[in-house]
């Protein structure tokens, strides 16, 4: 069974990311074509990158890196739930991505983003980062607007169509995660 990690991309106290990720997780759990797990970066207590060797070498000197590596390696694909911070993703998510290399390779990722402009610029930025890590980014993405999917910019009340958008994105992530399997087994 294909395993998909839904990564909570903000560690900020009071973050919207957790509620959005739990909503997506509940939608995903209704599917029978993959297994899903919530992955909270905050649980791994990653400092700003503190490994002496580039991740490409896979020589990790800290337990927090080894724990993060084992978790990310256990998936066939991912969904990144990302806020938009200054037209990019969060520093917390970028830092967590930078800690690893081979664990990401030849997998697929989809995005759920939110912000004033539906997190579109955060996703565009992440697509470039994923290219370097040899992760296939799927076309379908979920863009949540702070104006229309959150009441008073705060309480998460997604428009009805967003559930369909989550499933369209998951269709592609699951298909591509499966299609890339032969490359991962090399
Ligand atoms: C440092 C920072 C920068 C931000 N920059 C943007 C931005 O460029 N575009 C945007 O639409 N929203 C921006 N926002 C608003 C966030 O999208 C919004 O606060 C969101 O709730 C943050 O996600 P989080 O609550 O999961 O951490 C920014 C927020 C912060 C804290």
Image (cartoon, rainbow, N blue to C red):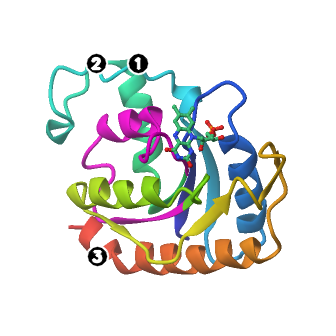
Seen at 70% across and 53% down, the residue is 146
**Horizontal placement of 47 versus 102: left or right?**
right
Q: Which residues are magenta?
A: 82-111
Marks 2 and 3, the one that precedes in the sequence: 2
Mark 3 near mark 1, Cβ–Cβ under 8 Å? no
Q: Position of residue 83 (x, y in %)?
A: 56, 46
Residue 34 vs 49, above or below: the answer is: below
Closer to viewer: mark 2 or mark 3: 2
Cα distance between the residues tagged 2 and 3: 33 Å
Question: In the rendered structure, does residue 178 fall within the stretch colored magenta?
Answer: no
Q: Which residue is mark 2?
A: 50
Seen at 21% across and 36% down, the residue is 55
Between 98 and 60, the residue placed more toward the observer is: 98
Mark 2 near mark 1, Cβ–Cβ under 8 Å? yes
Cα distance between the residues tagged 3 and 1: 34 Å
Q: Position of residue 25 (x, y in %)?
A: 71, 57
Dot 2: few (<14), some (14–19), or many (≥20) neighbours within 10 Å? Answer: few
Q: Position of residue 134 (x, y in %)?
A: 24, 61
Q: Quadrant of ligand 1?
A: top right
Circle 1 SS class: loop
Q: Which residue is mark 1?
A: 47
């Amino acid at each position: 069974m294909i395993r998909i990690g839904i990564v909570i991309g903000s560690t900020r106290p009071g973050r919207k990311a957790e509620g959005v990720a739990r909503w997506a997780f509940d939608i995903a759990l209704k599917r029978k074509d993959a297994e899903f797990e919530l992955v909270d970066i905050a649980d791994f207590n990653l400092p700003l990158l503190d490994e002496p060797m580039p991740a490409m070498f896979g020589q990790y000197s800290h337990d927090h890196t080894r724990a993060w590596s084992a978790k990310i390696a256990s998936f066939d694909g991912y969904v990144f739930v990302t806020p938009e911070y200054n037209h990019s993703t969060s520093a917390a998510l970028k830092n967590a991505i930078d800690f690893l290399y081979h664990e990401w390779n030849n997998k697929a990722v989809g995005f759920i983003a939110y912000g004033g402009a539906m997190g579109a610029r955060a996703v565009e930025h992440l697509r470039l980062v994923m290219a370097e890590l040899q992760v296939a980014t799927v076309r379908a993405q979920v863009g949540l607007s702070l104006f229309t999917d959150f009441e008073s910019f705060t309480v998460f009340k997604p428009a009805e169509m967003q559930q369909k958008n989550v499933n369209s994105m998951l269709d592609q992530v699951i298909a591509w995660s499966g299609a890339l399997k032969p490359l991962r087994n090399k």
